Amino acid sequence: MKPGTKLPIIAAAAIVVAVVAGTFFLRGDRTPTATAPDAVAAAQESAPSAGFAPPVARTAPSVPGRPATDEAMIEQLDQRARKREEHQARTAALKEQSAQRYASEQVDPAWAPGKITELNGIAADPAFDVAGAQPRNLSIDCRSSMCRIDGQFEDAGKAEDWILLYTASVGSAMPSSVISRTRNPDGTMRVEIYGRGR
C-alpha cells in the first residue's frame, strides 16, 4: 500500500471511533428501560385479578398525567349512569308538569273531538300493522290544548317500535310531547304521551 493512501483509512477509522464514543457517552445519561420480562411482570402485577393477565401488547402504556385505562373506563361508566339518571329525572319532571296541565284544562268541545279523531287516524295507519307494532289497547283524550295518549303493549320491543313510528308520523298534529314508559307486573309495557295539540 502506498503511503498516500493510508491517510483516508486513518481518517475513516477516527470518525468511526468518534461516533462509537459519542453513542456511549449519550447513552450514559439515560435511565435503562425495562426489559420485556420486566414489562410482563409489571403488567401482571397491575392487572386486576380476573384469573389471567391481559396480553402485554394490548396493555396501554403508562403516561404521566393520564389515568389508567381501567380508571378511565370506570369514570366513563359512572358519567353515563349520572347522565341517564339526570335524563330520567328531567323526563319525570316534564311528565308531571304536562300531566298537571292536562288535568287542569277544561275540554274544548269545538276542538277536542276533531283532534282526537286526527290522532286516532294517525294511530290507525297500516304501517303499524306491517311493523307488528299495534298496541293491545290505545286511548286518546284531548282537553283544550293538551292531549294524553295511553297505550298497552305486549313487550318493550313493540312499545319502542310504536313510539318510533307514531312520533315520526304525528308531526305538527302534536308538535311537542313527553313520553314515559312503564313496565307492568306481567311484563307488558305501558306508554303514556302528554303533548300539546295546538
Image: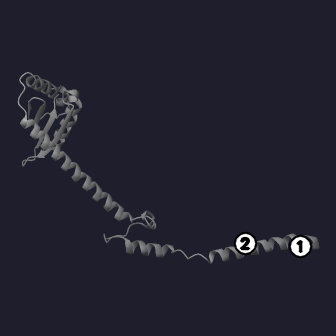
Q: How many C-alpha atoms fall within 10 Å of the one at disc 2: few (<14), some, or many (≥20)?
A: few
Of the numbered discs in the image, which one, if any, rests on residue 6? 1
Mark 2 secondary-structure assignment: helix
Quarter of image, res 80: bottom left
Quarter of image, res 130: top left
Of the numbered discs in the image, which one, if any, rests on residue 19? 2
Cα distance, mark 2 to mark 1?
A: 20 Å
Type of amino acid at the residue the image marks with label 1 = Lys
Whole-percent x and y of residue 91? Answer: 19, 45
Is 98 or 153 nearer to us in this picture? 98
Type of amino acid at the residue the image marks with label 2 = Val
- Examine the rendering and report whether any part of residue 2 can be seen: no
Whole-percent x and y of residue 4? Answer: 93, 71
Mark 1 secondary-structure assignment: helix
- The answer to whether residue 137 is left or right of residue 163 is left
Point out the image quarter for the C terminus: top left
- Which is more N-terminal, label 1 or label 2? 1
Q: Which residue is drawn at 22% across and 27% down?
A: 172
Question: Closer to the camera: disc 2 or disc 1?
Answer: 2
Above or below, 31 relative to 160 = below
Is 35 or 165 nearer to us in this picture? 165
